[in-house]
Amino acid sequence: MTISFKIITHAIQLMTIIACIRYLVFKKSLQPYLFFSIGWIIILLFDLAMVTVGLIYPKNNNWIYNIAFPLQQLFIMYFFTRLLENKNLYGVMSLFGLFAVFNLLFWQGRITLNTYSLALGGIIIVLFAFFKIFRLYRTDSPQSLYSEPAFWICTGFIVYWGMGSPFFAMYNFLWESTPSFFIIYFYTVNFGFTILRNLSIIKALQCSLITQR
């Protein structure tokens, strides 16, 4: 079952990369989704590369993720600031960046997965996404809302980080106290909600291409 879940997850990741490339080929205007597509391709290729490296050299590589994950979260935050057109949110991004650096150097360190940074970044992303959906609900009708790419991409990140942030906040405690529950929660978040997030991104890019025509 676990192997099947992994195969499906990575297949969806490849589909998402193809969807991003397709968007870059057929896009007709420069907009946040162009920037997002390029960045998301890099993020997914990095993830697939790390999975491959882990299969060949199964060593502790948390230090790489402790650098990569906060950068990914800052990328997502920046994308939402573009969607929201609110430069004041850059201050929130800066504070998060400083916290991630402090956590890496002085708190959880390089060896331990920096779960506090992941949890905080996830909460900020959820808040940004909720803020954007709230704006959409105020301006769009229910029918047009589901054709709005921002609705789908916000929903995907709310689902993923809404469930992922509590998990990462309790990551080390669950691993030490209830490893069996940890494994179930880990595969649910890391694979189940990853699939839903990438499917929502595919849907968002499709909607964005349709609205350009």
Image (cartoon, rainbow, N blue to C red):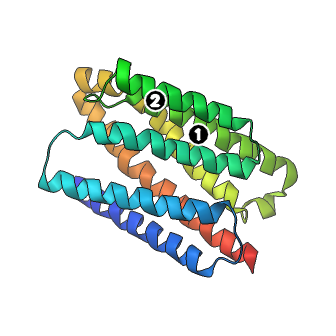
The answer to whether 198 is drawn above or below residue 85 in the figure is below
The residue identified by callout 1 is 125
Q: Position of residue 177 (x, y in %)?
A: 25, 20
The answer to whether 20 is drawn above or below residue 116 in the figure is below
Q: Position of residue 111 (x, y in %)?
A: 25, 29
Residue 169: in sight, yes or no? no
Between 135 and 187, the one lying in front of the other is 135
Residue type marked 1: Ile
The numbered mark at residue 100 is 2
Label 2: which secondary element: helix
Q: Position of residue 148 (x, y in %)?
A: 73, 62
Mark in front: 2 vs 1: 2
Residue 145: in sight, yes or no? yes
Q: Is residue 29 left or right of residue 54?
A: right
Q: Residue at x 62, y 72 (%)?
A: 206
Label 1: which secondary element: helix
Q: Earlier in the sequence, mark 2 or mark 1?
A: 2
Q: Residue at x 37, y 46 (%)?
A: 190
